[in-house]
Image: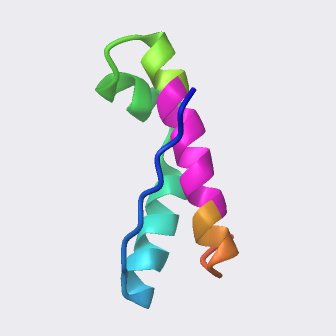
Amino acid sequence: MPTVTVTTELTDSQAMALAQFVKRLTGSEMRACAVDDDETWVMKDAIQTLQKSLADAGFSPR
């Protein structure tokens, strides 16, 4: 599957808020926004990738 690189600039507070949001986001909340279970799993994978990028930038809330 081809990949896409997304580059953005956030303030520290925006990055931490986003990290908190994706940490708190539940599978059932993602499922409610998805068209089917397959899309839910794709969303979960993307969120995990985003969390890793945020953590690598120093934004990894406990």
Q: Is residue 62 left or right of residue 31?
A: right
- Please tell me whether residue 36 belongs to the stretch shown in magenta: no
Q: Residue furthest bottom?
A: 12
**Quadrant in the rendering for residue 36:** top left
**Segment colored magenta:** 42-52
User: Would residue 52 be seen by someone viewing this image from the given angle?
Assistant: yes
User: Residue at coordinates 37% horizontally, 81% vertically from top-left?
Assistant: 10
How many discs appear? 0
Q: Is residue 26 left or right of residue 29?
A: right
Q: Quadrant of the C terminus?
A: bottom right
Specify the color scheme: rainbow
User: Would residue 61 be seen by someone viewing this image from the given angle?
Assistant: no
- Please tell me whether residue 46 belongs to the stretch shown in magenta: yes
Along the line of sight, the residue nearer the viewer: 61 or 15? 15
Relative height, residue 17 to residue 53 (above, below): below
Main secondary structure of the magenta stretch? helix
Q: Is residue 25 left or right of residue 1?
A: left
Q: Quadrant of the N terminus?
A: top right
Residue 39, image x, y percentages: 44, 20
User: Residue at coordinates 34% horizontally, 22% vertically from top-left?
Assistant: 34
Residue 16, image x, y percentages: 48, 77
User: Residue at coordinates 40% horizontally, 33% vertically from top-left?
Assistant: 29
User: Residue at coordinates 66% horizontally, 60% vertically from top-left?
Assistant: 52
Residue 60, image x, y percentages: 65, 72
Relative height, residue 33 to residue 15 (above, below): above
**Quadrant in the rendering for residue 56:** bottom right
Relative height, residue 40 to residue 21 (above, below): above
